[in-house]
Image: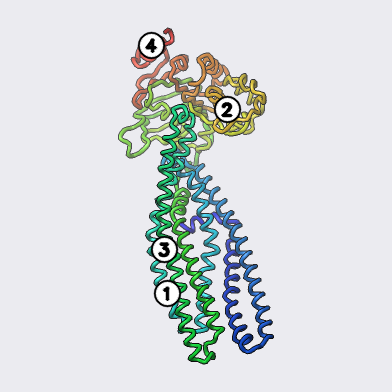
Amino acid sequence: MFFKLLRSVRQYALAAVLSPLCMIGEVYMEVKIPSIIAIIVDKGIEVGNIQVVWQQGLMLVLCALASLSFGVLSAVFAAYAATGFSRNLRRDMYHRVQSFDFGNIDKLSTSSIVTRLTSDVANLQMCFQMMIRMAVRCPMMVILASIRVWVISPKLCGVYLIALPLLAGGLFLLIRLVHPIFDRVFKTYDKLNNVVQENLHGMRVVKSFVREDKETEKFTGVSHTIYRDFVKAERIMAFNNPLMQLAVYACILAISYMGATMIVQSGNTTFTTGNLTSMFTYTTQILSGLMMLSMVFVMLTMSRAPMQRCCELLTEEPSLKDPEDPVTEVKDGSIDFEKVSFRYSEKAARYSLEDVELHIPSGTTVGILGGTGSSKSTFVQLLPRLYDATAGTVKVGGVDVKDYSIHALRDAVAMVLQKNVLFSGTIKENLRWGNPDATDEELEHACRLACAHDFITGFPDGYDTYIEQGGKNVSGGQKQRLCIARALLKKPKILILDDSTSAVDTHTDAMIRQAFAQHIPGTTKLIIAQRVASVQDADLILVMDGGKVVAQGNHESLLQTSQIYREVYESQIKGGEE
């Protein structure tokens, strides 16, 4: 898992290597300082040799400056490497998300993906920066200082041999207790993001139903859960500092007693006052190194869950892939369904589509009618291979959709949904999603076909009018017409309108259909609608019910043969007369 994430370091690898090297230089200089102080005390101050004091004092200043310089360089390199790592990791994850199909997104959930790309990556950035600095500094400090202590007095090393296992055992116990809590916290963050997203997307509904208090209560509940878990974790980790402090002062007391005894017994010869002074400093360095090392373990414990979550996203494989030798060109817009059945999950109790057998010639206008839950949208989503059929074969242009390059297939199929999306940017920029190279004349032609040109030119800035995120500054009908124009700019072989004229009046709906018939006769058009008037002029009308095509034919034949179609038609005609 760790090495999987390290692949995102890439061009920042040099900085990631230089930072710990500089840190080793800083630690070496810090460890050298107490030995210089010991020389000053023993060979300078106690014997009154001022020359030694000046020489070693200058050496002390140089070591301190070198340590400072190495420390600053290490911090700069670490910051550069960590921010670069997070940038690459976030980009790698985002690119991975772009390859996902609907099944992957349904599995991971939108809110969880957002959390992984934001707070999880931020946590890993801090962890990475700590790893290339503190995770190197602490063990090096302990090792080098311990070597110096061993050189001074092997006997006093026994003090650390007693303290270290006690500290290691306490730290292991704390980490074991805390990790499940942090793992739970990051999953709760997904719920928090989901609550916020739902609230912001549905703000108009919240306001209209005066449910602000309920939404606040929901948010507060999830937020309090995170607070409670963090408090619990911090209470457990609060034992870390007293444990370390206890070890530090216990070691200092033991070394003070044993060192003073050795000075008296040796007459300040084999073990000197300078040695004892340096031992105090080395004790602080060793145990403070262990204390910082414990914080590194805490940080790693907190980052373990984000590591797993980010790796899960990076290793998630899209279920829809190109074949080894894909077909890269869609010949025409003909459609064939050969005994097609589909369900969204293997665990699903029933099929959403069942045993659909159908042939639609290229250039045909097809109307699709059916009640809510009759799988009309599921039916058309199999064409651009947003999902794969569970059984049977779906063909476009006489070729199985699984044999196409996904990019080529989707480029030949344009979908306009009832709740289609506009992105923040100008109208021109939104329209050019359909064709980045479209000229202004082509934009205008597509908008005229979609009956959007008149309202666009009514804006002060015309086609340069800025669209807010989600198209909030245009009406539902205007948004749908802009989305239709965007789809037309693709010049698709198949055009799918999934109830995409529901927000426009019947006159505009009729004008759009008439424009389609006159200007894109070779394009196969599938129109899902709730109004019979929107599909009654179609070459072929499909009536769906319970995931099956229960009737098909033109308007006149269905009035004679399909009870469902006749009932819908009569109810709408009667409603119109009333």
Where 311 sits versus 562, above or below?
below
Picture coordinates of residue 482, whole percent (x, y):
57, 25
Determine whether the residue tagged by mark 3 lies in a helix, strand or loop.
loop
Q: CA distance from mark 1 to mark 2?
A: 67 Å
Q: CA distance from mark 4 to mark 2?
A: 37 Å
Looking at the image, the residue that sits furthest to the top is 577
- 431 on left or right of 573: right
- For label 3, count other residues whose C-alpha is less than 10 Å away and answer few (under 14), some (14-19) or many (20+): few
Q: Residue at x 57, y 27 (%)?
A: 473
4 and 2 marks in contact (CB < 8 Å): no
Question: Between 46 and 324, which is closer to the camera in this rendering?
Answer: 46
Find disc 4 in the rendering and name its residue. 570
Q: Earlier in the sequence, mark 3 or mark 4?
A: 3
Q: Amino acid at mark 3?
A: Phe
Q: CA distance from mark 3 to mark 2?
A: 55 Å
Q: Earlier in the sequence, mark 1 or mark 3?
A: 1
**Looking at the rendering, in which quadrant would you find the C terminus?**
top left
Q: Residue at x 46, y 78 (%)?
A: 253
Where 501 sits versus 559, above or below?
below
**Foreground label between 3 and 2:** 3
Q: Earlier in the sequence, mark 1 or mark 2?
A: 1
User: On residue 473, which mark appears?
Assistant: 2
Q: Earlier in the sequence, mark 4 or mark 2?
A: 2
